[in-house]
Image (tube, helix red, strand yellow):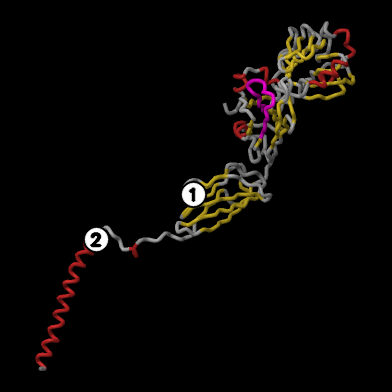
Amino acid sequence: MSRSSRTHVLARPRVRAAVVAALLAPLAACSSSASPTVPDAKATPRPSDRPVTVTVTPTGERVPAGRPVKVTAAGGRLTSVAVADAEGHRLPGKVAADGRSWVSDRTSVPGAAYTVTAATRTEGGTTGSTGAAFTTAPADKVNKVDWRPGADATVGIAQPISLVFDHPVRNRAEVEKQLKLTTSNGTEGSWGWISDWSGRDRVDWRPRTYWKPGTKVTLNAELNGTDSGADGGWFVRDYTTAFTIGARQIVKVDLDSHRLTLVRDGETVRRIPVSGGTPGGDKRSWRGTAVLMAKEGTINMNSETVGLGRTYDKMVDHSMRLTWSGMYAHAAPWNARYFGRANQSSGCIGMSDADAAWFYGQVRPGDPFEITGEDTKGVVAPGNGFGAWNLSWTEWRQRSALR
């Protein structure tokens, strides 16, 4: 009985071993064949959740202005970037498609304190935010701009946009790039650099041909943070103006027949007898296209201011400026015997009080005066008022710094 029991006990372990061996054999074979293509799920690497490293350029105190701000990310992505100065003015920009960088569209301005805030996302999906700050060195010299026409004006079909600078502009291409002009009808035109009558640098924009009436024009001169170049200084503000083109009016002045004709929308409105500049010397008038710059009303005209000695010093009514050198259209009752007969003025286009009063009420700044005549000083220069129309379209385009 006891021997039989010991034999049973001894036999059972052998059965278990055989069964276990049989079960393990196919399992071992299956594991061996599948391991190269089916990785253990527990062994798959998990995305990193380490913080994103953000780098901002520039950094520090009193860094040079006039450069874009750059933000880069390592170990994750940028989701947004905000760069603003102490007054809340932002530098716009866009995050790159890969989320690794951001560059401002505009440059930093002189004498400003900037804060940079970058929103980020790690490779593991955790969001965060990084801040930085820097300041720019102040401008050692500031360049300012005088511009025409003024905002919300209605002007004639020959009116250019004209910017005159306080200091020289050597970086003309960089400045011209910042001058954003839009029109309501896609008017073709070009900037051209000239010397103003004052001797200062100037840039004008004129259409290829006279403006179409009703055109709306907007200039955004995004100059803040632009360096003029040597001896010019920095621009520290933007400029903007918007205006509308009025009726199609052209003033035709024939100095040989001593007649002024106002033409509106292709129709003659009125002919006026006039007297132009005296032939044969410095008192002659200019020819070519001059543009009405301003209606100045009653002003004092003194010949000494235009290099004609003590020829005259008097108050003159209905004065309409045509050039910086002093050519006007105005009332000249003292010259009545010459109207329609001879040129006997000191260079201006004179007419009767009644005609001048009527004409003054009809014209507006920007109207072209197309002046012809044999005996004149020459053609109005581009910088002597708005004389750009005396250059061909090809010649004018050559004056752009971006040609």
Against 14, residue 331 (above or below) is: above
Find the magenta span and give its range: 203-219
Image position, residue 354 (x, y; %) = 87, 16
Image position, residue 400 (x, y; %) = 61, 26
Image position, residue 335 (x, y; %) = 88, 11
The 10 Å Cα crowd at callout 2, few under 14, some 14 to 19, many 20 or more, is few
Against 121, residue 311 (above or below) is: above
Can residue 311 be seen in this snapshot?
A: no
Relative to 14, is 69 on the left or the right? Answer: right
Is 209 a magenta residue? yes
Q: Report the residue at 45% width, 59% height from top.
A: 124
**Residue named by callout 1:** 99
Contact? badges 1 and 2 (CB < 8 Å): no
Q: Secondary structure at mark 1?
A: loop
Relative to 105, is 296 on the left or the right? Answer: right
Split into 4 quadrants, where in the image is the N terminus? bottom left
**Residue named by callout 2:** 34
Q: Amino acid at mark 1?
A: Gly
Q: Report the residue at 47% width, 53% height from top.
A: 74
Name, please, the residue furthest toward the bottom: 1
Q: Report the residue at 77% width, 23% height from top.
A: 364
Q: Report the residue at 58% width, 28% height from top.
A: 402
Is 52 a magenta residue? no
Relative to 351, is 181 on the left or the right? Answer: left
